[in-house]
Amino acid sequence: MQATDTPRHSSQATHEMVGEEALVINLNSGSYYELNDTGARFWQLIDGQRTITDCARIIAADYEEVDIAEVEADLLELAAQFQAEGLIVI
């Protein structure tokens, strides 16, 4: 996974927003994941067009005094988990 990758949701994944959080479900395994507001925002930004760096910039802009590099590192880690669980594809 690289910051220049443009992930998109897998056809195996669906989600439901609950307030500012998201429930993401792997339709093949039945596993589900609860995402906090930041994770949910990232999930919403994943569209196959935006890079992970683009998503980090957007999310960092929502907060004061947040280092974009730190947000990007966190999103790369989360994206790798999503990919390992079959929720996104590159």
Image (cartoon, rainbow, N blue to C red):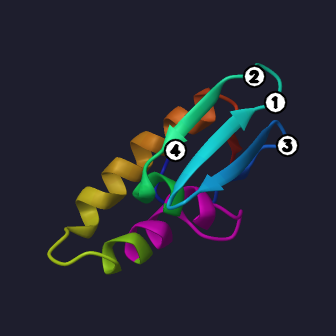
Going from the N terminus, do you reach mark 3 or mark 2 first? 3
Q: Quadrant of residue 8?
A: bottom right
Sequence-wise, the earlier of marks 4 and 3 is 3
Looking at this rendering, what residue extends furthest in the top direction?
29
Which amino acid type is marked by label 2? Gly
The residue shown at (52%, 38%) is 34
- Whether residue 29 is in magenta: the answer is no
Residue range of the region highlighted in magenta in the rendering: 42-57
- Say if mark 2 contacts mark 1, CB within 8 Å: yes
Q: In the rendered view, does 78 fall on the left or right side of 30?
A: left
**C-alpha span from label 4 to label 3:** 16 Å
Kindly identify the residue that appears in the image at 19 percent across and 69 percent down: 66
2 or 37, nearer to the observer: 37
Q: CA distance from mark 1 to mark 3?
A: 8 Å
Q: Which residue is mark 2?
A: 30
Q: Report the residue that reaches farthest toward the left.
A: 65
Q: Which callout, 2 or 4, points at the residue further toward the start of the chain? A: 2
Q: Are marks 1 and 3 in contact (CB under 8 Å)?
A: no
Q: Is residue 86 above or below residue 70?
A: above
Instruction: Single out the mark in the foreground, 2 or 4.
Output: 2
Relative height, residue 48 to residue 34 (above, below): below
